[in-house]
Image (spheres, rainbow, N blue to C red):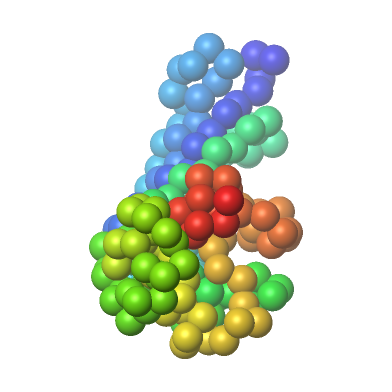
Amino acid sequence: MPDDFFGGLDFGTSGARISIINFNKELKYTNSVPYQYGFKNPNSWINSCEKLLDNLPPDIKKNIVNLAISGTSGTLTACTLRGDPIGEAIPYDQACNENKILIESITFGEDHLQTPYSSLAKALKLIDKFGENIILRHQSDLITGWFLKDWTYGEEGNNIKLGWI
């Protein structure tokens, strides 16, 4: 257990960060990189993740037992069914008013879903733009799916933000 490391990847608006601690909760490594293509481009998230992992010292990399991933809450992107990003993500701070009447008619007083900044409003805008044959993923869910090569699930809190309960 003393050689085990635990890490966190955080994807923000300007770049990505990684921190690694040991079993005794001592910080052993930290690094950050800016987004190569900008925040709205999901390929920037993947590219930043690759850079951070490539730069890990080998003795830490081979002994990571857990890695948590966080991202900007409410940033949503569309992907192909294979998980490849399609176009730009809609950031957490962008309002989407296009489907206001539809959202109000299907959410029955769920105030968190009725705001134009909700993930549901963003999801409907992405479906309008790219069609229904897509996967919708929040920033952290895209990175998790990329890691696992499995696009079956999104994180529970993010799914609730989409109204998928």
Q: Nearer the viewer, residue 59 or 133?
A: 133
Left/right placement of residue 42 relative to residue 165 reads: left
Does 24 sit above or below residue 115? above
Q: Number of marks in the image?
A: 0
Rendered position, 150 above or below 106: above
- Asked if residue 84 can be seen in this view, the reply is no
Residue 112 visible in rendering: yes
Q: Quick check: 146 left or right of 91?
A: right
Which image quarter holds the N terminus?
A: top right
Rendered location of residue 33, percent (x, y): 38, 54
Q: Position of residue 58 (x, y in %)?
A: 63, 39
- Residue 63: x percent and y percent? 68, 30
**Which residue is depicted at the point 69% across and 75% down?**
81
Quarter of the rendering containing residue 59: top right
Residue at x 53%, y 12% (from the top left corner): 24
In percent of the image, x 35 and y 76: which residue is there? 101
Q: With 57 as the anchor, is 64 left or right in this view?
A: right
Give the percent coordinates (x, y) of residue 135. 61, 71
Q: Quadrant of residue 99?
A: bottom left
**In front here: 62 or 13?**
13
Residue at 68% across / 31% down in the picture?
65
Could you say which is closer to the camera, residue 3 or residue 155?
Answer: 155
Q: Is residue 105 above or below residue 109?
A: below
